[in-house]
Image (cartoon, grey):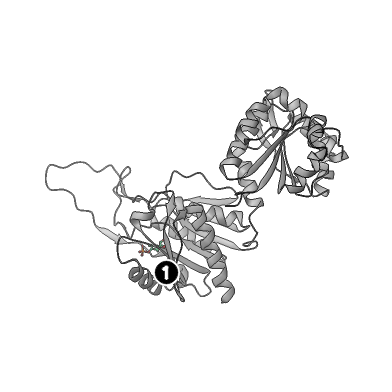
Amino acid sequence: MELEGKRIVLGVTGSVAAYKAAVLLRLLTGAGAKTQVAMTDAATRFVGPATFAALSGKLVLTDLWAAADENPMTHIDITRAADAILIAPATADCLARLAQGRADDLLAAMTLARACPLLVAPAMNRRMWENPATQRNLEILRQDGVTCLGPDTGLQACGEEGEGRMLAPETLLEVLRAFFTPNSLAGKKVLLTAGPTFEALDPVRGITNLSSGCMGYAVARAAARAGAEVTLVSGPVAQAAPMNVACIPVQSALEMYRAVMQRATTADIFIAVAAVADYRAERIAPQKLKKSAGSPPEIRLAQNPDILAEVAALPNPPFCVGFAAESERLEDHAQQKRARKGVPLIVGNLIQEGFGGETNHVILFDDAGSHPLPVAPKIQIARQLLAHILALMEKK
Ligand code: C5P
């Protein structure tokens, strides 16, 4: 995983958003990062160091001189070993001090002595943010190679509305993940389908399936983290839109087909993860169907277009990848599907092992044969799939 074992120094400065840093720390440790928290004196007025110590499992560094008593080189030792320093929240005062290169408290000294990237997530009142002095300091930091994350716009703790809110901890985690993912897909356009389709029968009823969209969203997320320009055409699901992904919500297979065909000619890679209905109702009843006393109504079905096969048949198609969820004889069905749809790669999985769950067990089928991947969380499968796609594209 991107953050597994990464040594992150989380700097916390004196803003009310310091309470959000505790949530961020929880997310970072949950993602496998090895964290060390350093707080300024002002930060400890907002949230006690004990909270951060409990969440990181390590004593929090606060005082330059107390740290120096134990080890005079604390600031250098810690930043020498760190993979990144993230200051969240970073106050206007913190940005000013960083821009000047001050070293008069422990966090400032550690930051100045770093040999790793520095990321800051500003949090302040909107007027402090807009002040030319703050913007000037930020410009200096950017020129020094510091990455500025946010801030967000919205209601502020002071009651004003505007720019200056710290980015949500979940967003900061996502940014950090992307930061540690090699940009292997930079410059590539990736188009995906995900989720089920919903084929209406009348204004309230329809035919659908149990696809959660989890696998398709994981592939979209992994592709965005690897630097791709990602468009996700999604059927109705209860998944949050991944960061830096253009999401196009659709319901029926025909809507999905149109949304994909409009974009397929400019895509480099097309990954069809959606569980598309093979058939739709020939006619959608304009009014709600009524229960009748006689025999049950008959529904006449019409064939839906095969989106993947149509994209693969374009004159200059993107690299096409299909999914085959089977309940038996996976290899036979997957290889037949690959040939029938004319695609270089099919990801096969047994329905009982993938549908709806957090993990998946898949086998990749290509010209060279079959490549089983170990059972893993869907995001990890997604990363391995993208690496396999890139390797195949490079061979072509
Ligand atoms: O034909 P079948 O549904 O078994 O194939 C599954 C693969 O084809 C998946 O990648 C799915 O997204 C894609 N597909 C499609 N359009 C359809 C049916 C399936 O793109 N109408």
Query: Which percent across, then down, holds residue 330?
Result: 34, 66
Closer to the camera, 53 or 277?
Answer: 53
| Residue 333 placement (x, y as % from top left) | 33, 69
191 displayed left or right of 35: left
x and y, in percent, of residue 320 in the image: 49, 68
Task: Tell me the kind of residue under disc 1.
Answer: Ala
Residue 170 visible, this orientation: yes
302, 127: nearer the viewer: 127
Question: Which residue lies at the image location 83% right of the left edge and 37% below the top edge?
Answer: 72
Taking the view exactly as shown, the residue that stands out farthest to the left is 294
Helix, strand or loop at mark 1: helix
Question: Which is nearer the eye, 202 or 190?
Answer: 190
In the rendered view, does 138 fall on the left or right side of 242?
A: right
Determine the residue positioned at 77% across, 29% down: 127
Write down the quadrant of residue 292 in the picture.
top left
Q: Nearer the viewer, residue 73 or 301?
A: 73
Quick one: label 1, few (<14), some, or many (20+) residues within 10 Å? some
Vertical position of residue 319 compared to residue 138: above or below: below
* Left or right of 304, for residue 347: right
Which residue was labeled with disc 1? 309
Tell me: is circle 1 under 8 Å from ligand 1.
yes
Quarter holding ligand 1: bottom left
Q: Residue at x 39, y 65 (%)?
A: 306
Quarter of the rendering occupied by the C terminus = bottom right
Residue 145 position, x and y percent, is 79, 50
Q: Horizontal placement of 202 versus 165: left or right?
A: left
